[in-house]
Amino acid sequence: MAVAIQIRSVTKSYQRAGETLRVLDELDLDMAPATFYALMGPSGSGKTTLLNLLGGLDRADSGEVRFGDTDLQGLSGGELAAWRARNIGFVFQGFNLLPVLTARENVELPLLLQPLSASQRRDQAERALQLVGLGDRMAHKPRELSGGQEQRVAIARAIASDPAVILADEPTGDLDRTTADSVLSLLQRLNRELHKTILMVTHDPQAASYADQVIHLDKGKLGRIETNHPARS
Ligand code: ADP
Ligand code: MG
């Protein structure tokens, strides 16, 4: 289900060595449903902080983060965790797979947070792995996979619960060019065919070129937003 995201006047600060560091400063951002966004900006500009607020991993000091009708600031800790499990898939630079689990078990892991039977979990995990082209690698452990395959397992894990939104923090940062391009094509396909909203942090202009829109963040403020592709119907 496609959902619009609205960020209104969001401020987030951290305390460090007795000083207040304002990481996001009265930020406003509108994200259209089913759109692929790249988020670029210098190191320390607040990209990961923004992703964490959108994914409900952290809370803003003030302002609003709305997903459709849901205002994240209004949810309790438990409500936020349940909301996150249903609505958000995370993908990280270092894949974050558990080495002792098979690909299928890794993908099943976040589904444990949902009211599903063991066979439903297994079906959903297998479907997600097939979707990312790893139907023949389900019983492999991470060390038996290439980096690109590991990241595709992580993407399968992110989409197994069929969330509307995928948040990816430098997902191709540890991959070579060819492997990165196949992971980026996969993300683009999830956007175009399954209508996922994707927000992907990247330093790489070529990676950003896969997105529909490129958002620039600098010192906690939004800069220009570039359009790569005309709107699709
Ligand atoms: P980016 O992802 O753009 O590199 P981050 O959002 O990770 O930037 O961090 C923005 C700034 O906030 C950095 O200066 C970072 O050191 C600081 N920061 C991030 N998380 C914390 C935290 N939990 N406690 C204190 N400072 C933090
Ligand atoms: Mg970061």
Image: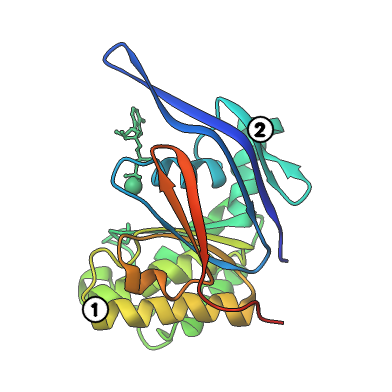
Judging from the image, what secondary structure is the residue with disc 1 in? helix
The residue that mark 1 highlights is 177
Residue plotted at (50% across, 40% down): 57
In the image, taking residue 28 as reference, residue 19 lies left or right, namely: left
For badge 2, the amino acid type reads: Gln
Q: Is residue 39 visible?
A: yes
Q: Is mark 1 within 8 Å of ligand 2?
A: no
Q: Nearer the viewer, residue 92 or 138?
A: 92
CB under 8 Å between callouts 2 and 1?
no
Q: Position of residue 116 (x, y in %)?
A: 64, 61
Q: Position of residue 107 (x, y in %)?
A: 45, 66
Query: Which comes sooner in the sequence, label 2 or label 1?
Result: 2
In the image, taking residue 107 as reference, residue 140 lies left or right, namely: left
Q: Quadrant of residue 192?
A: bottom right
The residue that mark 2 highlights is 73
Characterize the local packing of mark 2: few (<14), some (14-19) or many (20 or more) Cα atoms within 10 angstroms. some
- Name the quadrant of the C terminus: bottom right
Q: Is residue 90 above or below residue 12?
A: below
Residue plotted at (43% across, 47% down): 217
For badge 1, the amino acid type reads: Arg
Q: Quadrant of residue 56?
A: top right
Which quadrant of the render holds ligand 1?
A: top left
Characterize the local packing of mark 1: few (<14), some (14-19) or many (20 or more) Cα atoms within 10 angstroms. few
The number of numbered badges drawn on the structure is: 2
- Name the quadrant of the N terminus: bottom right
